[in-house]
Image: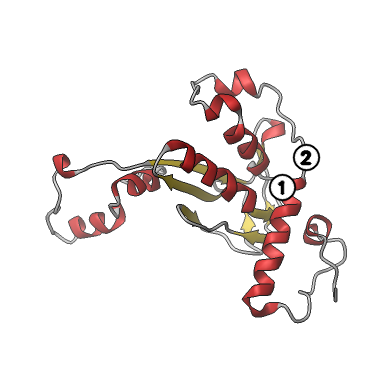
Amino acid sequence: RLQVEHPITEWVTQLDLVREQIRVAAGERLELRQEDMQGKGHSFECRVYAEDPANGFFPSPGKIVAWHAPYGPGVRVDAGVEQYTEVSVYYDPLIAKLSTWGSEREQARKRMEAALRQCVVLGPTTNIAFLIELIAHPAFVSGETHTGFLTEHFPQWRPQRQAHLLEAALVAALTQAQSGQKGDAPRHTTDTPWQQLGGWRTGG
């Protein structure tokens, strides 16, 4: 079976594991042996969840008002949501998996930090702000991670600011405008999270 972290393996091996599974299921033989596999570079994966890190990572179900996936060199997004998707109380509140690759660890880490800052999820509370602080933490940057990392460095985490949401919402608005939808502003009801956090003004 595929592990949740299989994008990491695919990044560093450049092997499509899903394709190989399908080939094996069809009765074909694997073309590679274990000794043929060579890892290259470094990769990170962050899971974007509809959950509240400031409240014990409690699930935060609800409708996604706006969704903008990050992109760029060495960035991959595996998501099963889109705008107006309802995050249900009955299933895992995973929104997307972000993974990045770099020729060395710091490049992969910086790409992940940039990807997280680009990511827009408006509606349910998410762990994006927490992930940004975690991946930018000096101890994480230097590779000093262990099983007690969160207890040591984030015992009672609270979001420091909401600026990344403003930045991310602006990125989403600009991207939408550049995609050929920059005529009339999207129709939103008054005081939606998009307007509050993205600064959108109808007709402006």
Q: Nearer the viewer, residue 89 or 19?
A: 19
Quadrant where the C terminus sits is bottom right
Indicate the amino acid at tag 2. Answer: Arg
Q: Number of numbered discs present? A: 2
From what the image shows, is residue 2 above or below residue 16?
A: above
Q: Label 2, on which residue?
A: 161
Which residue shows up at 67% across the image and 21% down it? 155
Q: Position of residue 148 (x, y in %)?
A: 54, 19
Which residue shows up at 71% across the image and 47% down it? 164
Q: Nearer the viewer, residue 59 or 131?
A: 131
Q: Label 1, on which residue?
A: 164
Q: Say if residue 65 shows up in the picture.
A: no
From what the image shows, is residue 62 above or below residue 186?
A: above
Mark 2, Cα crowd under 10 Å, few <14 / some 14-19 / many 20+, is: few
Q: Considering the numbered disc 2 on the image, is that residue within a helix, a strand or a loop? A: loop
Q: Position of residue 102 (x, y in %)?
A: 42, 45
Q: Position of residue 159 (x, y in %)?
A: 74, 35
Left or right of 27 in this view: 56: right
Q: Say if residue 188 shows up in the picture.
A: yes
Which residue shows up at 55% across the image and 22% down it? 149
Q: Considering the numbered disc 1 on the image, is that residue within a helix, a strand or a loop? A: helix
Which residue shows up at 50% across the image and 49% down it? 97
Q: Nearer the viewer, residue 28 or 176?
A: 176
Q: Position of residue 24 (x, y in %)?
A: 18, 55
Indicate the amino acid at tag 1. Answer: His
Left or right of 61 in this view: 19: left
